[in-house]
Amino acid sequence: MNVLDSLDLIALLTPVETAPEVKPAHPENSHAVAPIPDKAFRNMPDGIAAGLVAYVHALQGRANAYFARLPRIPGDQITVDASGRKYLRIVQNNASSRSVVCFVEKKTGLIWKADGWATPAKNFPRGNVCDLAGIHQEGWAQYHY
C-alpha cells in the first residue's frame, strides 16, 4: 500500500461537516393585507381613508417581519372591523385567537389604545393614521403603533 492509498482511506474515514438543518418555514408565516370592508370608509375624509390603508399595510408588514424570525409559528393577520359607529377596531388574528390591536377614530384618524374588546382607552391618543413617522420606532406595543 503506497502513501496515496492511505490518504484516500483517511479521507473516507474522516467525518464530513454538514450544513445545519434548516427548519422549514410555516406555510402561514406571512400574510397579505386583508381587504378593508367598504363600510369602514363611509363618512370618512379621503386623507384619513388613505392613512388607514397605509397604517394597516404597515401593521401587517411589522407582523410579517416579526413572525419571519419564528419559522414554526403561524403569523398573525391584521384585519379591520368596521362594526362600530365612531371607531374602527384593528384586530390581530392568529391560529387560535383574536385580539384588539387598537382603535382608529373614523372622523379624525386618531389611534387609541384598546381598553378591551369593545372600547378604546381614552386617556390620550397614541398617534394618527395620517402621520406614520413613528410606526417604526420602539414603543409600548407589540407592533409599535
Image (cartoon, helix red, strand yellow):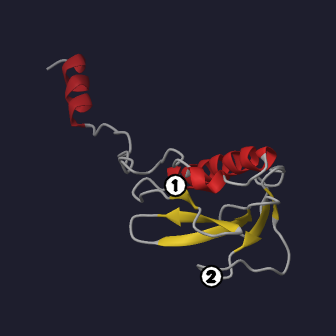
Above or below — where is 61 with respect to 8?
Answer: below
The three-letter amino acid code for the residue at tag 2 is: Gly
Q: Is residue 106 left or right of residue 25?
A: right
Report the residue at 54% width, 64% height from top.
92
Position of residue 1 relative to residue 42, above or below, is above
Type of the residue with mark 1 = Phe
Front residue of 90/13: it is 90
Q: Which residue is mark 1?
A: 67
Q: Quadrant of the N terminus?
A: top left
Residue under pointer 2: 116
Spatial CA distance of label 2 from label 1 is 24 Å
Question: Hey, which residue is sitting farthest left in the picture?
Answer: 1
Q: Residue 72 appears in which quarter of the rendering?
A: bottom left
Residue 90 location (% of width, % of height): 61, 63
Q: Decide which of tag 2 and tag 1 comes sooner along the chain.
A: 1
Q: Residues within 10 Å of mark 1 (few under 14, many from 20)?
A: some
Q: Mark 2 or 1, which is nearer the eye?
A: 2
Secondary structure under badge 1? Answer: helix
Residue at the (42%, 60%) spot, across then down:
73
Q: Residues within 10 Å of mark 2 (few under 14, many from 20)?
A: few
